[in-house]
Amino acid sequence: MADPKAMYQEVILDHNRKPRNFGPLEGASHRAEGHNPLCGDHLSVALAIEDQTIARIAFEGESCAICKASASMMTVAVKGQALPQARSLIQEFLAMTTGRIDLEATRQIGRLAVFSGVRNLPTRVKCAILPWHTLQAAIDSQPRVSTEAGADPSPHRTDPP
């Protein structure tokens, strides 16, 4: 079995170098901007929702490798999904990365499991979850989201408010 740390690093590097669905999205019906003031990550997520399904998705911005890889993998995972399934995956990913559920309890995570170890790196958790909070904000037609303590949308913050 492959070393989980090595697999994590390989996936992060691959998606950082060649992010999927990176760039502008013409004709987006939903957009949101996310910001992580702790490390300076700033990205936007754009969606084209058709018949309650994420038909197209893209992201743009400047971020660290973990954030960019998480956003890239997120777009691949939710493209083509109905909104209820996408919302469920968002919650499952957030719970996994913040340590609220074990990997064995997840149902949809699949390849996203490489991010399960981030829960052991408190300063990097917000990097991994920012794209997911931004996706949630876009779906909910909220223009902005932040991981700053008082504005952190996570039910389980990684730092005190």
Image (tube, helix red, strand yellow):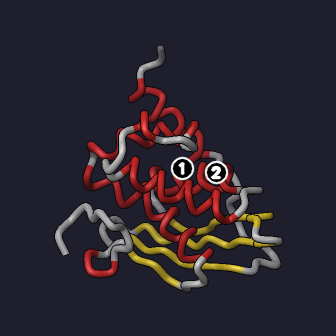
CB contact under 8 Å: marks 1 and 2: yes
Give whichever of discs 1 and 2 has the lower sequence position.
Answer: 2
**Quarter of the figure with residue 46:** bottom right
Q: In the image, which disc is placed on residue 51?
A: none
Residue that appears at 40% across and 76% down: 146
Which residue is at 59% across, 45% downward?
A: 15
Residue that appears at 64% across and 79% down: 31
Q: Look at the picture and state if 110 lies above or below 71.
A: above
Count neighbours of disc 1 (C-alpha within 10 A) and say few if under 14, some if 14 to 19, many if 20 or more.
many
Total numbered labels: 2
- The foreground one among 116 and 72 is 116
Mark 2 lies on residue: 19
Residue 27 position, x and y percent, is 82, 79
Q: Which residue is mark 1?
A: 69
The local secondary structure at tag 1 comes to helix
Rendering coords of residue 130 (x, y %): 45, 64
Answer with left or right where residue 137 lies relative to residue 152.
right
Residue at the left extreme, as displayed: 160
Quadrant in the rendering for residue 116? top left
Disc 2 crowd rating (10 Å Cα; few below 14, some 14-19, many 20+) is many
Where residue 128 sits in the image (x, y, percent)? 43, 55
Q: Amino acid at mark 1?
A: Ala
The amino acid on which the numbered mark 2 sits, given as a three-letter code, is Pro
Q: Is residue 146 left or right of residue 156?
A: right
